[in-house]
Amino acid sequence: MEETKAPGSGARIGRRSLIIGGAAAAVGAGAWAAHDRLSELWWQVPGVAKPREDGAVDFGGAHWVAASSANWRRADRPADYTVDMVIVHVTQGSFDSAVRAFQNPGHGAASHYIVGQDGRINQMIRELDVAYHAGNREYNERSVGIEHAGFVDRPQDFTDDMYAASARLTAGICARYAIPVDREHIIGHVEVPGTDHTDPGPHWDWDRYLILVRRAATASTSATPTPTATPRSS
């Protein structure tokens, strides 16, 4: 549950100006097809503020509770960064303590989701955006992070409800981004290069988890393909 903050995106502004400027010139020449393409390119360039709906979630079973903006970076995934990985974390604390940590601008880290032992799910960062959760910039940009409330040395913390809810969540993420359901693309924080974390630890049952994810993916009814709005929480 930590991350080194990424540097600013100033270098990308020149790229955006180049793309848009070139397309605009074509429009001036009467090329309306280029004008349409310009609109598409605008949303595909990193750093552009794509409109968002307040309180929207990417998974229908999640409740929106916003993380501090200091703990994530605005993006427009998968247009600017390909999403091809889910990273499993354990909070080393309670559900509520993880929420408080992610809302703290001094914490410097947050995951997209937190899953509780009772199966409840909070979404704290949109999947569009880059969460500071993996301790590795490249892995942050290409992944969705899921925290699980508990401790790595307490197998009893990984409940049936938690596994089932997390599996439905991961199945939805994999469906949205065409991510294969396997251990190459669904990994633990411990497997991220350069990190010193050990989560989810030796008691996380990977075989069971992948079976549940595949089962949820087959059922498909639990995966929500478009964002839905939920009441906003502080």
Image (tube, rainbow, N blue to C red):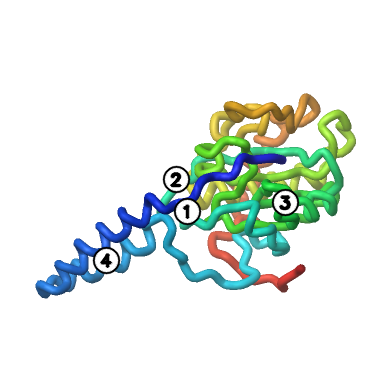
Q: Which mark is residue 77?
A: 1
Q: Which residue is mark 4?
A: 38
CA distance for labels 4 and 3: 39 Å
Q: Nearer the viewer, mark 4 or mark 3?
A: 3
CA distance for labels 4 and 2: 21 Å
Q: Which residue is mark 3?
A: 106
CA distance for labels 3 and 2: 28 Å
Q: Which mark is residue 17?
A: none
Q: Position of residue 162 (x, y in %)?
A: 79, 45
Q: Earlier in the sequence, mark 1 or mark 2?
A: 1
Q: Earlier in the sequence, mark 3 or mark 2?
A: 2
Q: Nearer the viewer, mark 3 or mark 2?
A: 3
Q: Residue at x 66, y 33 (%)?
A: 189
Q: Mark 1 near mark 2, Cβ–Cβ under 8 Å?
A: yes
- Quarter residue 92 falls in: top right
Q: Which mark is residue 82?
A: 2
Q: Residues within 10 Å of mark 1 (few under 14, many from 20)?
A: many
Q: Amino acid at mark 4?
A: Leu
Q: Amino acid at mark 3?
A: Gly
Q: Residue at x 87, y 39 (%)?
A: 157
Q: Position of residue 168 (x, y in %)?
A: 67, 49
Q: Amino acid at mark 1?
A: Arg
Q: Earlier in the sequence, mark 4 or mark 2?
A: 4
Residue 83 falls left or right of residue 223: left
CA distance for labels 1 and 3: 25 Å
